[in-house]
Image (spheres, rainbow, N blue to C red):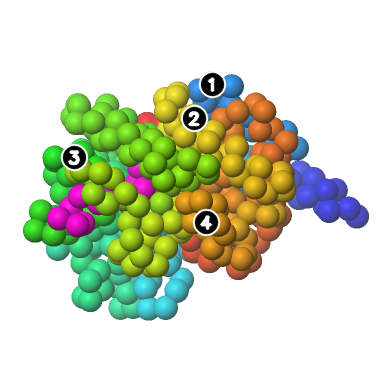
Amino acid sequence: MSTRLRTMVRYILLGIFICLGTIIIIASGGGDGKDNGNNNAQENLYPYPQHTDYVGDFIKPQNYTQSELDEITASFYMEWQDKYIKSDCAEDEYYVDFDEGSTICVSEGLGYGMIITAIMAGYDADAKSYFDGMYRFYKSHPSSINPLLMAWEQIDGCITNPDGGGDSASDGDMDIAYALLLANRQWGNDGDINYLEEAKKIIAAIMQDEVNPETFTVKPGDWADSSQPLYYYSTRTSDFIMDHFRAFTEFSADQDWNKVIDTCYVLINSIQTDYSPATGLIPDFIINCDSAPVPAEENFLESEYDGAYYYNACRDPWRIATDYLISGDARGKNALNAINSWLIASTGGNPENIKSGYLLDGTQIGGYQDVAFIGAFAVSAMLETQNQQWLDKLFELMTATAEGLDDNGYFGNTLKVMYLLTISGNYWSP
């Protein structure tokens, strides 16, 4: 039997399973399996799949039907959920397993997990239980600086790492806040958690302690204060999550979030114009945001590639593309067109030539492939109809291992779920 035929058979069987599962859920009166009390009565108002009508002439992979895209995404989600969602810290808590060394969870992963489970509700009967348990895990591990934010790292013993893990990381908090807004739409607020009120609290805390009030740049975390100007006036480009900021504006009525959006796009344009005119690539970190923004120097915060397109910035095409797909902001499309044009030319139109990291001039860093990079480029390819063949190739490569988790690790596998949700049209805004 050919690979394609085996894949089609698997999709048919999975579709039958989905239908039977839906019948069982309806017959049992709904509910989320692991919830108790009033939470069981909360209906899934936006059950998976939700085929979002993104903005503009966006494209999806043509080599699969919409039903197949939904099923590829759902199938991989279930494998991811089984491997990474853990409940061995407290009876009513869940977290996303970091799966490396003594670290069991980071706030970034928890934010991803909360977004994913809020979107997968209606397909996964336990999605709400997982979401609420992750919310409780977040509440159990507050930042030592602003307790409405989350301590960024938890280690063996289910404790916050006392060696530098007690303050916050901005992207984790922003995803947690956005997930709470999704939960507000998905389940309402008649259960044990008032998702909307909790979202408003963390959104205000993010503005207070993770946004620089002078430059309206997103700081790396609540720890970067004015006593250390180098970090206070720096930003991590993977924190440019503009679709979240638009939702924060809507629900908080704080117009300063629009200033944060504008600042992100100004910085992107500045770096592309002055430091990567041939590639459009954006570095992991930008410093001197109060004066003349430049890519960070080596070992600014994380690695020798802090000023390169590496394991933070690899998410940028996905984040920027998502903002365009939701809002239609042409600044995002223009920024990504520059990157996509360089990438297609530099790889000869073969996505197997994409490597894991680049200097801003396009020089390769890593000599291997990584779905964290490939999947983000696939999302960015959705913005132009002329990218159809390129997107189809990227998606084939990205999902070549969709039947299993393989060797991508927590980071690649979790991002793959997020990428699949967006590419399949199932990412939506609250």
Mark 2 or 3, nearer chain start:
3
Residue, x 20% and y 43% (percent of image)?
291
The stretch of residues the image draws in magenta is 229-241
Mark 1 or 3, nearer chain start:
1
Separation (CA) of disc 4 from disc 1: 30 Å
In the picture, measured across the screen, residue 279 lies left or right of residue 157, that is right
Q: Are marks 1 and 2 in contact (CB under 8 Å)?
A: yes
The numbered disc on residue 56 is: 1
Quadrant of image for the C terminus: top left
Q: Are marks 2 and 4 in contact (CB under 8 Å)?
A: no
Q: What residue type is labelled 4?
A: Tyr
In the picture, measured across the screen, residue 119 lies left or right of residue 401, that is left
Q: Which numbered mark, 1 or 3, is in the foreground of this view?
A: 3
The numbered disc on residue 358 is: 4
Mark 4 or 1, nearer chain start:
1
Which residue bears the numbered disc 2? 333
